[in-house]
Image (cartoon, rainbow, N blue to C red):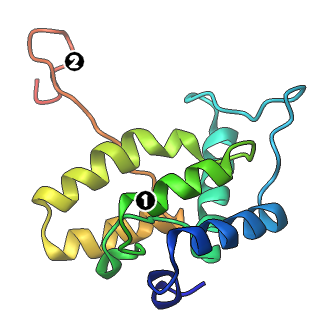
Amino acid sequence: MSQTAATELSVAEFASRARAWLADNMPRLDPQQPPRNGRDDEGAWQRARELQRRLFEGGFAGICFPREYGGLGLDIGYQKAFDIESDGYEMPLILNVPTFTICCATLLDTGSEEQKREHISAALRGDEVLVQLLSEPSGGSDLAG
């Protein structure tokens, strides 16, 4: 589904397309064998990137992110509809924090146009995982020291 096609759909039509696409393209969750999700598990990160790539190629990544940075540019109603439809499917949830909710959001607020175009679109494609490093001078993890 192209960005233009997505913007022409009502929320209900978008949800219907998402329902069909998810059934054909994303793995169902198996309560007997939960997906790998440990943050110290390289395989979990690779799986999340693979799933993110699927979402992007299917036209369901970055639903609320601006179109100029690789998203669909839709409002929150579309994201909520997708969230409802994706319940019960394996999703790349470990990418939500920090990649999307911290790093990409910060880039949207403070990044240069070049940074936004390069890193947000790469994260939406599953090509990059963005992280946040903190320096705590009085906490023993001072990066500068």
Q: Foreground residue, 119 or 22?
A: 22
Report the residue at 72% width, 63% height from top: 19
Q: Amino acid at mark 2?
A: Ser
Q: Position of residue 107 (x, y in %)?
A: 21, 58
Query: Disc number at residue 2?
Result: none
Label 1: element kind = helix
Say which quadrant the C terminus sits in. Answer: top left
Label 2, label 1: how far apart the Cα atoms are: 41 Å
Question: Residue 77: which numbered mark, if any?
Answer: 1
**Disc 2 target residue:** 141
Q: Amino acid at mark 1?
A: Gly
* In this rendering, position of residue 24 left or right of residue 142: right
Q: Residues within 10 Å of mark 2 (few under 14, many from 20)?
A: few
Q: Is residue 17 visible?
A: yes
Q: What residue do we see at 66% from left, 57% from top?
A: 51
Q: Tell me residue 25's x, y (percent).
A: 79, 65
Residue 56 showing in the rendered view: no
Residue shown at 51%/76% (left/top)?
10
Quick check: 83 left or right of 25? left
Tell me the quarter of the picture where residue 62 sits: bottom left
